[in-house]
Image: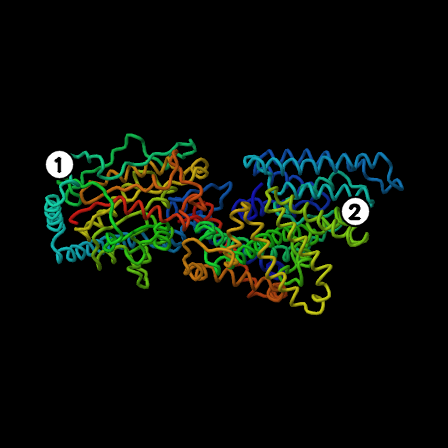
Amino acid sequence: MILFNSLTFLFRFLPIFLFIYFLTPARFREVVLFFGSIIFYAMGGLRMAMGLTALTIINYILGQMVFSADKGGVKPANKRAFYAAIAIDAGSLILFKVLSGLNNKVVLPLGFSFYLFKMISYQADLFRGEITRRPDIIDTVVYFTMFPQVTQGPIMRWNNVGFEKRERTVSAKAFNDGLFFFVLGLGMKVLLADPLSMLWFEIEKIGFESISTPLAWMGAIGFSLRLYMDFWGYSLMAAGIGMMLGFHFVVNFVHPYWACGIAEFYRKWHATLGAWFRDYVYIPLGGSRKGNLRTILNLLVVWMLTALWHGITPNYLIWGGVLAILIIWEKFVVDGIISSFPIIGHLHVWLFIPLTWVIFAIPDLKELRIYFERLFPFFGNGVNVNTGDFMKQVLVYWPFLLVSLLLCTPHWYRLIVRNRKKLPVILILAAVFWICVYRITISESNPFMYFSF
Amino acid sequence: MKFLQMLWRRYTLLCVLIITSLPLMIIGWTGRSGLYSEYELTPLTKPALALVMEGIHDGVYPWQSLIGPEEEVEEADEAATEEIAEASAAEAVTSESGNPAAGYAEAEDSAVEVVEAIPANAIRGGTDTIPEGVCNPVMQAEDYDVVNVAFLSPDDTEYNTDTEGIFAKNGIYFKLGSVDPTYFSDALFIGDSRTVGLCEYGSLKGNAAFLAKESINVYNILDKELWFTDNDEEGWDATVEDTLKDRSFGKIYVALGVNELGIGNTYMYYEKYRELLELIREYQPDALIYIQAIMHVSEEKSSSDSCRNNTVICQRNYAISTLANGRDIYYIDMNPYVCDAYGDLLPELSGDGIHLKASAYERWDRSLMENAAVIGE
């Protein structure tokens, strides 16, 4: 697999693929997409391509056995096939997660878990009868393998990208919009997320015990923004390519930092993952319909699973646990207050989310404690702290922080999107594209550029 | 025409991207064996326009291909004239404070006097082999067999130590010993981000002068402005040459080598390092020069990184250590203060495996204080 933000993808794979895709008559485009996707993975290593092909075939065969919509109800055979598929998919996911957690050398193929999520949702949708037309092999393999949604999602669903009705709207408008979102996402990733990741690197370099409290907060905010720009940028690139090919735009981030409360934040942050957990874990467990105690338990289960999905080190469990507690707190204690005073909900997001990202970022619990002692210095003193560190980093990182912060508000993003057909915006976007290409070229030809000491 | 208009109207962004990429592609492709011949073109994975980007990064601009050969020759001549002019200017500066050779003779004289004062620290020399205790030995490290040999020089490479006129050939050797912080009051530390860290988190700030900047290496150090700070004064940007010209230092500490690990081989590094020392000696004929070892990296880095590993670092440390003469140029190695038995940087001292954490700089400070040449005190 190759990254979207690489020269090979931007100037070799994507243009050639698009050229062939659009030259091919519409009814054969699925085949082109399938082969394109396989080549896309194979370019990054055959192992992943082979693993993916094997899982795809197994899921297709089992899916055919699970599908029951045309027989008027679920039969025991459908059930058995469904459980077998879930066991294989969830088992593979757990196996890879545990192996990569225990041994750094077993690397989970990038994006692998997103495929398995998609496969599980496919089987569940078939089982529940939400997919009403029997999927044929081409549709199925294309749905599983299509390269635009890879390393970071979004997690596409059979029905909401247009597979159910075989909807494809290939048009100049969709293509243009797709390209616009792709370049916008590329800019977020290369020009904002990548430089911001160096701020966290600087903080690690100094050592958490020696950072000043203002720098500790700047680090937490910088990490929060970097994660957002990285993730949202990649999602926009994926959704943009999808649009160019004629699929529906998949919304994955809806200005989460503008949300009113933690629960709302997670409906807007990586929305396809949240929706997946809601539809395939939380609601099947009973959701919030079985009393308060059961709701709390269900929320805890969902968040523990979310945490384990991110990694098996204890910091992820703390991260998931804290988020579950915050969501329960909002739902059962301060719900009324937040409705009356939305600012409280915003403050929740702006204060707690960066703190939870710090937990997310630091796997070593001792180091995590030290970082929190620097965030809240009344718990302990720093070692050899240089009080000038904050200003030094502000002078370097303020442009990236500022632009990222502006993009956190819906207003700026909407302004750009609304004016996307105006020439000045197009020219700015073209400039963004070329600056990205410059940065990518330099970092590829000298991989140590980001790490010049 | 109508078709083109329709294309532009419907696919404006795509058209802008294609139109802007065409000249870049043409310039890159036509210049691949000319202006951009130094860059590698791999058509399967890398477009020709990447060459233009790489060129811009290195200050090679597309319009330079438009300059005809004659003009290029003229430019080269001009550059050469400028260089000569600069060299004479430099000579003029040094003659004001006595010519370099005379300056050096004075230094040697004063050294001889000092030996009479503290004979216990001095060993009479006169051979090319520096006695034990004068300079630090080069610390060795475990080889994890990940090294890319392109960054190394053959083991039997000879490093030219015949530097008479700039470096002392004969005279008296001084053993390294302990000093107190006041020793550094006339010292200048030159280096990269590691030295920036020493300045910000070590105990010498306010006592010594620093001239350092992130990402500096021996190949670019003379072309860039570094950050200069002296005795806690507000700092400013300054080049190495200007600083050495304008000020006088008793000791000059150099620590460069981590950014060079992915550039060139050991011998190239050694040659540039030597040129830097020659320049320092030219402007500061009386200063003691300390070549500081490149600090090793952590085991995690050293066992996985083909260039930033201790095998390359040890070879390069050996190469620069040959530039020391034990009289006015010393090689000091702080690695024993921060490494484990395998020569790997202790993981608890570093957040990234390359730099010391702020809390660990006191070890570097200590190594400096325990490994100083005491002359005339």
Farthest residue, direction bottom: A340
Is B102 situated above or below B262? below
Residue B5 visible somewhere in the drawing: no
Is A369 situated above or below B133? below
**Circles 1 and 2 on the same chain:** no
Badge 1 crowding class, 10 Å Cα cut-off, few under 14, some 14 to 19, many 20 or more, is: few
Farthest residue, direction front: A379
Label 2, on which residue?
A284
User: Which quarter of the picture shows residue A59?
Assistant: top right
- The location of residue B186, given as percent across then percent down, is 23, 55
Q: Nearer the viewer, residue A57 or A278?
A: A278
- The location of residue A433, given as percent across then percent down, is 53, 56
Q: Nearer the viewer, residue A48 or A94?
A: A94
- The location of residue B153, given as percent across then percent down, is 32, 34
Residue occupying the point 17% across, 51% down: B286
Q: Is residue A433 left or right of residue B157?
A: right
Q: Is residue A189 left or right of residue A383?
A: right
Confirm or deny contact between disc 1 and disc 2 (CB under 8 A): no
- Label 1 to label 2, Cα distance in Å? 88 Å
Q: Amino acid at mark 2?
A: Pro
User: Which quarter of the picture shows residue A391?
Assistant: bottom left
Label 1, on which residue?
B126
Tell me the chain of label 1.
B
Q: Nearer the viewer, residue A359 or A36?
A: A359
- The location of residue A348, given as percent across then percent down, is 63, 62
Q: Amino acid at mark 1?
A: Gly
Total labels: the figure holds 2
